[in-house]
Image (cartoon, grey):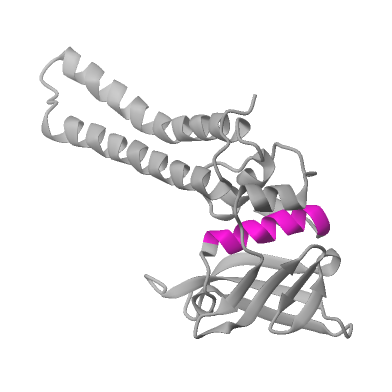
Amino acid sequence: MEIFSLKILTIVKLLYVLRVLILLMILGIFGLLIFVVKLNDSSDFVFWILGIVAVFLGRNFFDYLKRIIISRAKYPLPVNLLCNTLELGKPYYFGKDKFDLDEIINDNQLPLTFYYINNFQHPILQFNKDKILFHSQEYHWKNFNWKYFFYSENPNAYRPQGKYLIEFYASNQNNIRIKNKIEFEKIKADENEVILLFVIHDLLFGTKASYYY
């Protein structure tokens, strides 16, 4: 039964907060074990065992709560795939892959046109049902291959510097195969908003590349 009529991005934010709270709880248990509980008698040893078990169960507890929350959402599959793409907990793939495009866009108040960050009159990215336009090039979702990943010029560094982006490979309106990338800092948009639109259109019209996360 649907109990979460919240917007998809609101549910994802809720899950982020929940994960942080569980992490703080785990760190609190660690602190309690290290600074408070001493191994002076058998009861202290029992506290240590229970604390270690609680730490190991923390992640599973988050995944359990995440599954319950998403299963009660109006659009479980898009929420699942967005969380998978963002590496937010254990991957899940349940939910219907058929839904009304206009309804999900309206329910989540998602824009379909995004503008260049330095020129609000210049649309850089547009979602038009089974087509996507980027830099005035039009592509069909049916042959649009994309991936969201962390890009770094020096990935082998101890702490690699880089950014997340979307890279795609598709044929444009002139049937020319093009490989390009979408850099979020150049678009006036929320990053998760763009990723969610990719997931939604990929499910309805595309190659379902979002299943591979």
Depth order, front residue of 12/43: 12
Which residue is located at x 29 percent, y 40 percent? 24
151 vs 181, left or right, is left
User: In the figure, 175 relative to 107: above or below?
Assistant: below
Depth order, front residue of 209/138: 138
The part of the image, by quadrant, that contains residue 22 is: top left
User: In the figure, 159 relative to 58: above or below?
Assistant: below
Query: How would you classify the magenta stretch by its main secondary structure?
Result: helix
Query: Is residue 209 in sight in this rendering?
Result: no
Residue 92 pos. (x, y %): 63, 40
Residue 84 pos. (x, y %): 59, 49
Specify whether residue 199 is painted magenta.
yes
Q: Which residues are magenta?
A: 192-205
Depth order, front residue of 191/92: 191
Q: Quadrant of the N terminus?
A: top right
Which residue is located at x 80 percent, y 44 percent? 98
77 vs 160, left or right, is right
